[in-house]
């Protein structure tokens, strides 16, 4: 990474620490009141941490899974070590179904594994690959922030609204959509960031508001249902969100509630920006209709930290993501460049 280009930037609170023989993850389920690190030394533990939302955010999930493969290699037997590592990759792939970064990272690790002829060489090569995935994600975040600001071409400070958490906690550092917020603040072009609370896991209130406030970035927390009133007020110039998967036609899967924000933004004449690394783009899927949408069990909605918020046993619809059609997206920003008004042709020009 070009240190000179990023010397004035704080990458934010990291979500993971690779210690060579173990992976340490900040338990994001406990934030903001507790900062507790978990030490993981097996691929199964990493898969469980991803499934249980210890770590979340598409880029961070992919990075964690890559380190999980390294841990599998470190514990693999001298005989049948290739099969053991492949089994671990399969276990990690089953942890979350929607975020394509997970499968992208695991395919990179599978490719590295195929080139190794001894367990010792596999351990070394897989570790180098995982560290590179981590470092490349941070570099991509910094590049995306610069691309976004160049596209916005601002001459005075603005306020923005964001949804879920897309910051240093969800990535290898700095952030995707929240990286743009950071860069706006660094450039003294940010008046305020409105953060949707993001039910049911409250990533906006527990993580985004915590992360921005911790780093001295102006933030106002709002209920998800207040977003329409905020946009109607004229206070916000851009809605900026991340993505867990972007298809070949520019449809975007992101945290549940993103689709409604896109509709509101279009109605109120507010720009709608999606910021995500190229690893989030899945050109194998023609549209968002093909994206598998994860649904989680109803307790997450009926309770908040074990406190009942609804009648016990009431039926619950709990999709984790929704799909925003490309025609509601004003711009997609990746480290490879910017796509305005995305469609199949413009996506293909950048990613094929």
Image (spheres, grey):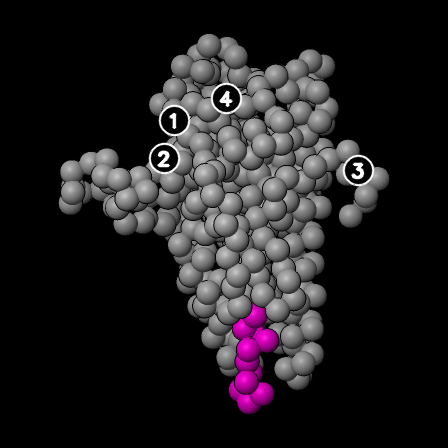
Residue pointed to by mark 4? 220
**In the visual, does 214 lie left or right of 89?**
right
Evaluate if marks 3 and 4 touch, with contact meaning CB atoms under 8 Å apart.
no
Q: Nearer the viewer, residue 292 or 207?
A: 207
Mark 1 surroundings: few (<14), some (14-19) or many (≥20) residues within 10 A: some
Marks 2 and 3, how far apart in space?
35 Å
Residue pointed to by mark 3? 7
**Mark 3 secondary-structure assignment:** loop
Marks 1 and 2, how far apart in space?
7 Å
Evaluate if marks 1 and 3 touch, with contact meaning CB atoms under 8 Å apart.
no
If you read the primary sequence from the N terminus, does the residue marked by circle 1 or circle 3 appear first? 3
**Mark 4 secondary-structure assignment:** strand
Q: Position of residue 335 (x, y in %)?
A: 68, 42
If you read the primary sequence from the N terminus, does the residue marked by circle 3 or circle 4 appear first? 3
Marks 4 and 2, how far apart in space?
16 Å
Residue found at the far right of this picture: 4
**Which numbered disc covers residue 224?**
1
Write down the region rendered in magenta: 71-81
Q: Position of residue 203 (x, y in %)?
A: 44, 37
Residue 85 in sight: yes
């Amino acid at each position: 990474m070009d240190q000179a280009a990023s010397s004035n930037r704080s990458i934010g609170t990291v979500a993971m620490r690779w210690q060579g023989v173990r992976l340490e993850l900040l338990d994001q389920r406990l934030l903001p009141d507790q900062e507790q690190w978990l030490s993981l030394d097996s691929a199964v533990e990493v898969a469980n941490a991803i499934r249980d939302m210890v770590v979340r955010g598409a880029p961070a999930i992919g990075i964690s899974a890559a380190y999980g493969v390294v841990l599998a290699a470190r514990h693999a037997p001298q005989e049948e070590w290739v099969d053991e590592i492949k089994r671990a990759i399969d276990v990690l792939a089953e942890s979350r179904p929607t975020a394509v970064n997970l499968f992208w990272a695991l395919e990179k690790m599978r490719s590295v594994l195929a080139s190794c002829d001894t367990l010792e060489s596999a351990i070394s090569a897989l570790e180098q690959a995982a560290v590179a995935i981590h470092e490349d994600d941070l570099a991509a975040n910094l590049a995306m922030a610069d691309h976004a600001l160049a596209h916005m071409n601002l001459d005075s400070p603005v306020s923005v609204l964001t949804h879920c958490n897309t910051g240093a906690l969800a990535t290898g550092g700095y952030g995707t959509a929240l990286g743009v917020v950071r860069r706006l603040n660094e450039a003294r072009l940010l008046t305020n960031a409105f953060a949707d609370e993001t039910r049911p896991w409250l990533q906006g209130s527990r993580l985004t508001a915590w992360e921005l406030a911790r780093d001295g970035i102006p933030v106002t927390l709002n209920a998800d249902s207040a977003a329409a009133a905020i946009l109607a007020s004229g206070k916000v110039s851009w809605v900026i969100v991340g993505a867990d998967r972007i298809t070949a036609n520019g449809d975007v899967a992101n945290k549940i509630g993103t689709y409604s924000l896109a509709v509101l933004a279009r109605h109120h004449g507010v720009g709608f920006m999606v910021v995500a690394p190229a690893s989030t783009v899945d050109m194998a899927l023609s549209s968002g209709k093909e994206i598998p949408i994860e649904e989680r069990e109803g307790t997450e909605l009926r309770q908040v930290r074990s406190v009942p918020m609804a009648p016990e046993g009431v039926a619950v619809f709990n999709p984790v993501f929704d799909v925003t059609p490309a025609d509601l997206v004003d711009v997609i920003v990746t480290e490879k460049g910017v796509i305005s008004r995305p469609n199949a042709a413009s996506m293909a020009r950048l990613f094929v």
